[in-house]
Image (cartoon, rainbow, N blue to C red):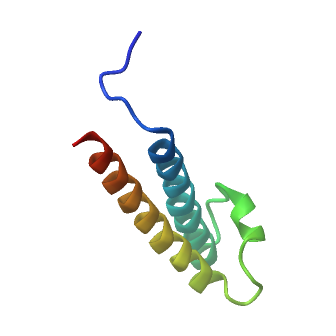
Amino acid sequence: MTSAKDTAPLTAVSHLLSFTLVVGGGSGLLHEWWGWLHFMGFVRFLVPEGYEVYSYVVMVVIGLAVGAAGGAFGDRGRG
């Protein structure tokens, strides 16, 4: 079974990293604000004590930037 879209390895890694950062940051924000959704709990080890909300927002922003850069890199390689 073959894929119609050939993805470069760097693009695939950037999309995986982007997904992890966005979902991890979002679930961390939900946990900080409402106290539920312990999905992807490993991200709590990445944030400093007392700066959880700021760190989770930064994680979401960096994840979006990495995803956009990976998408642009993938588009540039094809065209």
Q: Horizontally, is 35 left or right of 21 in the view?
A: right
Q: Looking at the image, which residue is at 41% across and 9% down?
A: 1
Which residue is at the far top?
1
Q: Horizontally, is 58 left or right of 42 in the view?
A: left
| Image coordinates for residue 40, horizontal then vertical, percent | 66, 55
Residue 29 sits in quarter: bottom right
Q: Looking at the image, which residue is at 36% across and 53% down?
A: 73
Q: Horizontally, is 40 left or right of 3 in the view?
A: right
Q: Nearer the viewer, residue 28 or 45?
A: 45
Q: Nearer the viewer, residue 71 or 20?
A: 71
Q: Looking at the image, which residue is at 61% across and 60% down?
A: 37
| Image coordinates for residue 54, horizontal then vertical, percent | 58, 85
| Image coordinates for residue 79, horizontal then vertical, percent | 21, 43
Which residue is at the far left?
79
**For residue 37, above or below residue 52:** above
**For residue 48, above or below residue 46:** below
